[in-house]
Image (cartoon, rainbow, N blue to C red):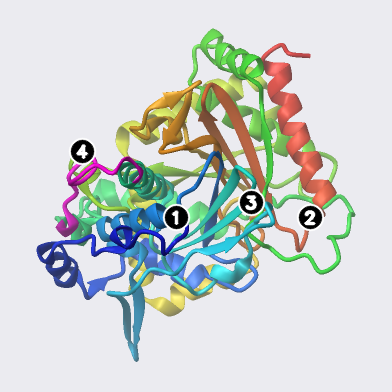
Amino acid sequence: MDQGSDRSLLAPVRPPEQVDVARELFPLRLTPFEYYFLLEDRAHYPSVFPVRLECRGTLERGAFDRALRIAHARHPLLSARIGHRPGRRPIWLPGEPTSIAWSADGGVTGSSAAHGRPGVEIRIAQQGDASILTFLFHHVAVDGMGAFQFISDLFLAYAHACSGAEGEPRWSVLRTELLRDRDGHRLFNRRVRLVDITRMYRVMLPLLVQRAAVIDPHGQSPDPGAGAATDFLLHTFDEHESRQISRAARRLSVRLHDLLLRDYFLTLADWNRGTSQERRPLRVLVPMNMRRKQDYRMPAANVFGYAFLTRSMAACGAPEQLLCGLQNEMSKIKRTRWAVYHEAGMRLFSAWPALLRWSLNRKWPFATAIFTNLNAGFDHVPLPCRDGRRVAGDLTIEAGYGAGPIRPETRVSVAAHRYAGRLSITLRGDSTVLSRAAQQEMLDNFLNRLRETAGLH
């Protein structure tokens, strides 16, 4: 369907009271994490994470445009803009969504074009009955879970528009006013206890005084003209391999997340062994969802914290003990909400912007690498299934995956995804340091490690 072929699809999608709610929300202060990602945003290291969907079937442009308007109306931070005030903290102001970039080359990948632009950019490449949808989410506005929340609503609205049904899709009611408390887990709204100060000290001090190892380039030169763009490498295990890897986790009585994390540590250790980085500890940053029960009624936003897991190279020489230790530490972090204390440290740092900039601009890695488990993100979209894949209108989501941002000295970000019974692994590397061949070699090493763990060799 051509974009202008059905004028009804372009009709206003928000009743006046919803518009008033959005207007009453702004101006809105930036949280410490949002301010952190705003300062982190650089031309070659944008605070952007891509999410890519591979779809098959007919994509109705008019219906998709209307669905996008509805999704943006439900998630106002993804169309908001940032206002800068001399001598004062930036604030969120109402804005307009960016338009979709359509192409017919069938091969869209991300770039650093989204640097400095909060919200989300959408690029759609079509070739025959195949469509690749690339979402470039700016981390100043939203975390990974919020991104999937937005995409879920987008496809629900699209399916509803394609069906021709009246009213709204069957989706959960969101409360826009909850965005004012999107960092409601913060500690400083109550009397600070000694235990809070102690835990914050234990989290922040190692990051500032103990330099983590960096990924060694092994003497390889980066590809000419390469930049730290938002593209990534991908491998999807077939259903048999995916089941075997999950069974290996159950056999070892651990979560799949812990098993993937253990093998990631082993891969990083093998990579740096025998290099100048061998004497430094490996530190992996793991984003943690910090949403409370009431926060699941909140529109898409950043509601997360960071956990840092540090291991010596020697500890990686005992895989069974390493797995047990990581399982215990991750369980403690989830049980005690330990990731709160890094956010508290960011809140203190953001009170003195010069101090926060100094901590970010040093050539000093807070983490060696990043590991994100996006779990079964697309499996949770409440749409009908066809052969285990979600369907919206005539469009079938064949696969979906993404990758986290990277920063100077934290040169690799890996993400795990499960969809339609298959496990996918993405790797995003710093192309200014690591060649494409080196990144592919690291991904292959991780995949082979997982196959060995699952007994697939």
Q: Is disc 1 placed on a helix, strand or loop?
A: helix
Decide: few, some or many residues near mark 1? Use Cα within 10 Å; few <14, some 14-19, many ≥20.
Answer: some
Instruction: Identify the residue shown where x is 47% and y is 72%.
Output: 117
Q: Is residue 114 above or below residue 181?
A: below
Question: Where are the magenta residues, as a range?
Answer: 162-177
Q: Are marks 2 and 3 in contact (CB under 8 Å)?
A: no
Is 169 inside the magenta-drawn segment?
A: yes
Q: Position of residue 447 (x, y in %)?
A: 72, 29
The answer to which of marks 2 and 3 sits earlier in the sequence is: 3
Quote the CA–CA distance across marks 2 and 1.
28 Å
What's under tag 3, amino acid-wise?
A: Ala
Quote the CA–CA distance across marks 4 and 3.
35 Å
Q: Is disc 2 placed on a helix, strand or loop?
A: loop
The residue pinned by badge 2 equals 434
Decide: few, some or many residues near mark 4? Use Cα within 10 Å; few <14, some 14-19, many ≥20.
Answer: few
The answer to which of marks 1 and 4 sits earlier in the sequence is: 1
| Quadrant (top left, top right, bottom left, bottom right) of the C terminus | top right
| Secondary structure that dominates the magenta span | loop
The answer to which of marks 1 and 3 sits earlier in the sequence is: 1
The residue pinned by badge 4 equals 293
Q: Is disc 3 placed on a helix, strand or loop?
A: loop
- Residue 163 visible? The answer is yes
What's under tag 1, amino acid-wise?
A: Met
Quote the CA–CA distance across marks 1 and 4.
27 Å
Q: Position of residue 50 (x, y in %)?
A: 55, 53
Q: Which mark is residue 212?
A: 3
Quote the CA–CA distance across marks 2 and 4.
41 Å
Is 415 inside the magenta-drawn segment?
A: no
Q: Are marks 4 and 3 in contact (CB under 8 Å)?
A: no
What's under tag 2, amino acid-wise?
A: Leu
Q: Position of residue 161 (x, y in %)?
A: 32, 47
